[in-house]
Image (cartoon, grey):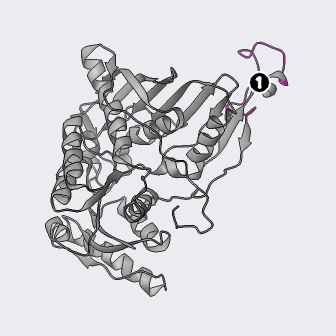
Amino acid sequence: MVNIAMIGCGAISGIYLKNITETYREIQLVGVCDLIPERAQKAHDFVEAQKAKGIACESVKIYKDMHEAFADPDVQVVLNITRPYEHFAVSKAALLAGKNVYSEKPLAVDMEEATEILAIAKEKNLHVGGAPDTFMGAGIQTCRKLIDDGVIGDVIGANVAMIGHGPETWHPDPDFFYKRGGGPMLDMGPYYVTALINLLGEAKGVMGMTKKSFSDRIITSEPHYGEHIDVTTDTYLTGSILFSSGAIAQIFTTFDVYYTMQPHFEVYGTKGTLAVPDPNTFGGSILLYRPEDHANGPATDPGLAKRSATDPYVHFKEIPLMFDYRENSRALGLSDMCKAIETGRNWRANYKQQLHVLEIMTSFSKSSASGKFIELTTKFERAEPMKNNPMHGILD
């Protein structure tokens, strides 16, 4: 059993609290901390309510600040789910205190911060990992197996998009989405880019064009209804990723567009096309279209063929999920890293993956500013695929 301290008890903490107490049997939450004491108290009370329902979990401490958590000898891993621009300071302080760190995405807001975090971890021989861990779920893992087994042939490329008009209509504290470390690429991009490299492998370089469409956003969610946000980050980012295999992926993320059908994630091969489920989920529908499906269709110009306005994948076939963890399984990567701490094996949501994803994401704006193709410096090797263990919540 590995003991966890949670730093940050905001909106995302609810699913972590639920899954740590209910699902993952090899980790245990021992304490919580938040700059807003009421949030930490709410997290504490949630655990108490879980105990009252008969769920096997222990009461948690409420730390007065993160440094008290880092000084607690019971804590082995710090779960850093603070706001993105706070990830660096919290992770750095935890590592300096001798604690392993698992953070929400991204690892840091730029490569300089990330490099410093990893240098400290290496010096102190500590584990660093982090979200997203959705790629470990049944959806992406099944897609990986289909691609690795050659079901769509050699991968030619991919096309992914996250299109929407921003979180200020629903998120209780949306301001940080438009500040340093925010924007659609660093907020939602990690899900898409992490899925891409787990399906297509290491990326070699990127080209991008980015912009900020609106300098001011008005919050329409509570409790900050009517307040204005000064936008300081790009909110419309599009570009291409060249993979070491030769495959090319297009990616588009925006908080500026009114749109209803999203997300979009397709992988193209020499023998077929795979429609990948939303990479911000662990399950979802997987759809496949192969030459035999096309051959059995009408012999006419596909541009003139009748098609369903509501289902662009009407001729695709659904593929069953082949792996566990198809529900919202956040903390799966955390549990996997904790298992690695105990056994000495590699962990899947590891810092090398986080660093590669961060370099890809931050290179779009660099390419846009310079007008040049950006060669990546980080290397990446895919971790072992997931294994179907007989007991849910126990990692291999």
Q: What residue is pinned by disc 1?
A: 291
**Residue 281 seen:** no
What residue lies at 49% left-to-right and 33% top-to-bottom? Answer: 201
Q: Judge left or right: residue 47 versus residue 308.
A: left
* Residue that appears at 76% across and 12% down: 301
From this view, report whether residue 4 is shown above or below residue 157. Answer: below
What x and y, as percent, mark residue 97? 16, 62
Quarter of the figure with residue 240: top left
From this viewpoint, is residue 64 visible?
A: yes
Query: Regarding mark 1 in the picture, which secondary structure is present there?
Result: helix
Where is 2 relative to 172, above or below?
A: below
Q: Say if the magenta span includes residue 273.
A: no
Can you name the residue that lies furthest to the front here? 344
The magenta region covers: 296-316
| Relative image position of residue 199 (x, y in whole percent) | 54, 36
Mark 1: give few (<14), some (14-19) or many (20+) Cα within 10 Å: few
Residue 177, placed above or below residue 98:
above
- What main secondary structure does the magenta stretch of the protein show? loop
Q: Could you tell me the amino acid type at mark 1?
A: Pro
In terms of depth relative to the viewer, which is nearer, 227 or 78?
Answer: 78
Q: Does the magenta stretch include residue 306?
A: yes
Left or right position of 243 against 84: right
- The residue at 26%/56% (across/down) is 126
| Figure quadrant of the N terminus | bottom left
In the displayed structure, 262 sits above or below 171; it is above
